Amino acid sequence: MGALFEWLCGCSEDARYSLPGLVHVAEPPKNVAFLRACFLKSSLFMSQPIVAIAGAGAAGYFAAIACAEANRDQRVILFEATAHPLAKVRISGGGRCNVTHACFEPRELVKRYPRGSRELLGAFHRWQPRDTVEWFAARGVELKTEADGRMFPITDQSTTIVTCLQREAERTGVEVRLKCGLVSATPLRQEGFALTLTTGEAISVRRLLLATGGTRGSAGFSIAEKLGHTIEPLAPSLFTFNVDDPRLREIPGVAVPSTTASVPALKLSETGPTLITHWGLSGPAILRVSAWGARELQAVDYRFTVRINWAGPAKIESLRAELQTQRRLHPRRQVSNTPVASIPQRLWEKLSAAAGIATTTTWSGLSASAAFALADQIGASEFSVTGKSTNKDEFVTCGGVRLRDVDFRTMESRLCAGLHFAGEVLDIDGITGGFNFQAAWTTGLLAGRAMAGVAAAAL
């Protein structure tokens, strides 16, 4: 270092030089005090290894904080190609942020992941929803559990989560660079990578984490491929169904709290609320079916038949019996005005009409054939799906970096030393309900601590 300082002080007038971590200087400064300051800054930067994290989403932020907390003797730089960090966190859950899910048994938790369940089992034994809840609570953010198990901040504001993560990143010394993404990563001879950034800069780092999400065209995928990784084909997950059917027209906004949605041709079936929209069908039951059938539904170009049981788990036989009970108890009432199975009035009127029942028909005047037709409409309505739409809060993809090439104890590549992955860049996706964020927190934390030098056994 002394020799470097002497060279700096004695360099010729026409010399050009640059220092690690500093902008390139075209003209050498004549002020020795300034030179000394440059030297000290250079020494500091040269003595601190750099950990680079690409992607300032949930996984990237959590990894950066975990890494900086576990090792203060290195620089942690979080690169984000856009001007909007934590964008998905801000809009998820209708702007409330569905942080995680109240499922605290790893073997049950992994059942909510159409892809990645086997690999995540060990990871969830190291960091699961209970740990996530405690992490945020320790930083002043309390979460609440809703009836369906989804967990949100008690403020019902996603900005609470965003502010917490940004505050922790600042506290731990994470450097966040916006509008600065990765273009390429070249392995160095001994260790680390030479990165080229979208700003034209070049930087050498000891460790690299790709947390660039699952968007098609992501730089993370191209970099991972060039470093030897296989990218599993991408397909949308968590999407709504486009349906044009008289039974759904003019009643957007109607929600049925307990339904069963199924795709008989693919043997897919999920329960939960279903929402009628301007373009067709949405809600948790529909989104879960879309997740489990992401690749199969893509293969049929999103043209298939979906069957809805508007009475949840009720069988056709029990529905017929319920209709007979209505006939006995309310013979003079009009069928169209007497919903059963908690079906909303406006939907009930549509189902009654579809069964061929006139609005003036009373229960006593309901024929056996009409009763059978009505039971079928309630318990087995079939709709032709002609396409899909992205759910505004849940834009998730399946596909990504092949999982068998990643060590899920450290989230490090098995093919390229020093390269780590976290979040949706991996071939992992969960159903709706906070499961995708939990995968992001878990993989981000494990990667962050591993990059800080924490041994895998201690993670």
Image (spheres, rainbow, N blue to C red):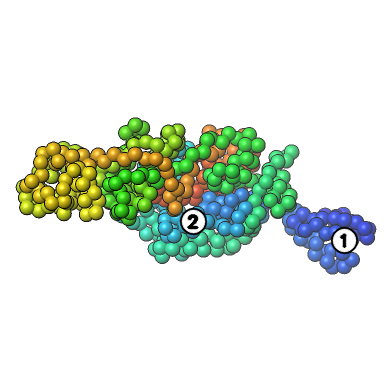
Residue at 32% over, 33% down: 264
Quickly name the residue at label 1.
27
Mark identifier at residue 166:
none
Say few, some or many: other residues with alpha carbon within 10 Å of mark 2 (under 14 / 14 to 19 / 20 or more).
many
Residue 452 locus on image (x, y percent): 61, 49
Q: Answer above or below: position of 91 versus 398.
A: below
Q: Is residue 226 rendered to the left or right of residue 343?
A: right
Q: Is residue 48 rendered to the left or right of residue 251?
A: right
Q: Give the alpha-carbon distance from disc 2 to disc 1, as whole Å.
A: 45 Å
Residue at 13% over, 44% down: 323
Residue at 31% over, 50% down: 249
Residue at 44% over, 60% down: 95
What residue type is disc 1 on? Glu
Rendering quarter of residue 24? bottom right
Towards the viewer: 86 or 332: 332
Quickly name the residue at label 2.
89
